[in-house]
Amino acid sequence: MIGDLMNEKVQLRQATSADYDTLGDVMYEAVRKGRSHYSETQREAWVPEPRTGKDWFERLDKQAIVVAESSDQIVGFMSLAADAYLDFAYIRPSAQGSGLFRRMYAEIEQLAVKSSQDRIWVHASLMAQPAFASVGFSVLKRETVMIGKESFERYEMEKPLTR
């Protein structure tokens, strides 16, 4: 499937509010069905169901969002929130390993540079940490957070930007 995706034309574009429910589905599929260093119980606590609704829409409305689309299906998205915080970075399992992370990140970095940001920072999951490191992020600290009754290890990371 990854080979098929790599042979297809994957377009990057800015998300619109019409995409928000689909982005919730992409996040759900990436967390719940993709490879993970977290247990099923942890993944269920993190994303119990696809995100949707007013709070989800309001959160996304405040961000610049890049989506990757293949054959009219959104296969990934990445977002930049206020203060150059990279809030979301999710790719459907069928598209993971296809180079989409790097392509979407390059677009996000351009947006941050254009808005005169000095850095981009992120809270990266155990799965995402190597991908962020591969594009120049450094670990500031490893932390443990609670979601419901589940604890999660993650990394706070940053990448200085040059203008």
Image (cartoon, rainbow, N blue to C red):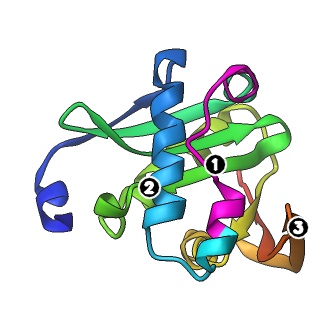
Determine whether, in the image, residue 130 is placed left or right of residue 86. left
User: What's drawn in magenta, residue-wise?
Assistant: 43-58
For discs 3 and 2, the disc positioned in front in the rendered view: 3
| Cα distance in 3D space between marks 1 and 3 | 18 Å
Disc on res. 127: none
Q: Residue at x 58, y 76 (%)?
A: 127
The reply to whether residue 106 is in sight is no
Disc number placed over residue 91 in the picture, else none: 2
Q: Which residue is mark 3?
A: 146
Task: Kindly identify the residue that appears in the image at 85 percent across and 40 percent down.
Answer: 83
Asked if labels 2 and 3 touch by Cβ distance under 8 angstroms, the answer is no
Mark 3 residue element? strand
Q: Tell me the kind of residue under disc 1.
A: Phe
Q: Quadrant of the N terminus?
A: bottom left
Along the line of sight, which residue is nearer the eye, 98 or 48?
A: 48
Magenta-colored stretch includes residue 12: no
Residue of label 1? 88
Percent x, y for residue 134? 54, 76
Q: Is residue 68 visible?
A: yes
Q: Which class describes the residues within 10 Å of circle 2: few (<14), some (14-19), or many (20+)? A: many
Q: What's under tag 3, amino acid-wise? A: Met
**Would you place residue 64 above or below residue 134 in this image?**
above
Residue 105's spot in the image, x, y percent? 53, 53
Neighbour class for label 3 at 10 Å: few (<14), some, many (≥20)?
few
